[in-house]
Image (spheres, helix red, strand yellow):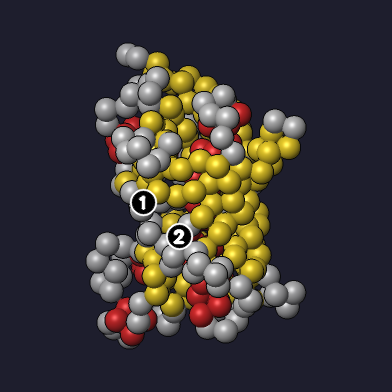
Amino acid sequence: MSKIRFTKMHGCGNDYIYVDVTRHPIAHPGETSVRWSDRHKGIGSDGLVLIDRSPLPEADFSMRIFNADGSEAMMCGNASRCIGKYLYERGLTTKTDIRLLTLSGIKLLHLHVVEGSVGSVTVDMGEPILEDERQYKATSTIVDGTFVSMGNPHYVIFTEDIDQVGEKGPQLEHHPSFPQRCNIEFAHIRPDGRIRTRVWERGSGITQACGTGACATAVAAITNGLAPRVSDIVMDGGTLQIEWSESDNHVYMTGPATFVFDGEIEL
C-alpha cells in the first residue's frame, strides 16, 4: 500500500486533513475521507481537502473538499484560509493574494503576513444570494429562518436557544424543503453586539466553526436589521470577522488558520 503525506489544520476548530495531490494523488477521495475522518479509527477530522494546481489560467490553485460522510462540499471558508497559510508557509507560492478555484467559483485570498508567518487570512466570499424564505416553509415542522446561499445553502435561525443545534440540526438538514440538504445555523445576538452561532454542517454534523456559515449568519442578521455591516461571529471554536460590503455587495471573512501536525498514513 502507498503512503500518503498529510497535514492536519484547523480554522477556529473546524479541522480538516490537507493533501497536496500534485505529490500524492488520491483516486477515491470520498471513501478516503470517510476512513480518515473517523475520530476513533482514523486521523480524525471534519473532512478531507485536496490541494491542486488550477486547471484554469484565471486561478492559481484549486481545492476539493469532502465531508466526513464522503459527500463533496461546494466550498469551505475555514479550509480556504488554511490553504492560503499552507501554500505560503510551505513555499508553494510567494503571493499574498491568491486566486483559489472551488466548486463555488474562484475565491480571492488575502494573506496577512508578519515576519514570514500568516497570522490571518481574508477571503472574498463573493455575493450572497438571498431567497424568499417562504418557499422553505413547506410544512409546519420547519422553524422560521432566513435562507442564504454563500455558494452552498444555509438556513439561519435566530433564537436564544442555540444549543438545540444537536436536536434540530439533523432534522432540518434533511427536511423536504431542502432537496440538496442544508447547513443549519442557530444564532443569538449578544448584548455586546457580537453574534453567538452554532452550526450543524451538512455532511459533517456539529462543527466547531463554519466559514460560509458565519458569512450566512452575518448576512441574515443584517437583512433582518439585527446587526451592522461588520460583525464578529462567535462560534464554538473561535471568532470570525465578517463584513458585507456596501460598495461591491461582497462578503469578506477574516480569521486565523492553524497547523496542527503533519503525518503519514497508508492509503
Q: Is residue 37 above or below residue 235?
A: above
Marks 1/2: CA distance?
Answer: 9 Å
State the residue at coordinates (75%, 32%): 115
Q: Is residue 28 left or right of residue 112?
A: left
Q: Secondary structure at mark 1?
A: strand
Q: Is residue 11 above or below residue 202?
A: above
Residues 144 and 65: in front is 65
Q: Is residue 145 above or below residue 168?
A: below
Where is residue 205 shown, x and y percent of the image?
44, 55
- Quarter of the picture containing the N terminus is top left
Q: Earlier in the sequence, mark 1 or mark 2?
A: 1
**Label 2 is placed on what type of residue?**
Gly
Crowdedness near tag 2: few (<14), some (14–19) or many (≥20) residues, C-alpha within 10 Å? some
Q: Is residue 177 left or right of residue 171?
A: left
Residue 6 in view of the camera:
yes
Where is residue 118 shown, x and y percent of the image?
66, 38
State the residue at coordinates (43%, 27%): 20
Q: Looking at the image, do the residues carrying marks 1 and 2 touch, with CB atoms under 8 Å apart?
A: yes
- Quarter of the picture containing the C terminus is top left
Crowdedness near tag 1: few (<14), some (14–19) or many (≥20) residues, C-alpha within 10 Å? some
Q: Which residue is mark 2?
A: 126
State the residue at coordinates (42%, 36%): 61
State the residue at coordinates (53%, 29%): 93
Where is residue 66 shown, x and y percent of the image?
36, 43
Count numbered badges in the picture: 2
- The answer to which quarter of the image holds residue 32 is top left
* Mark seen at residue 105: 1
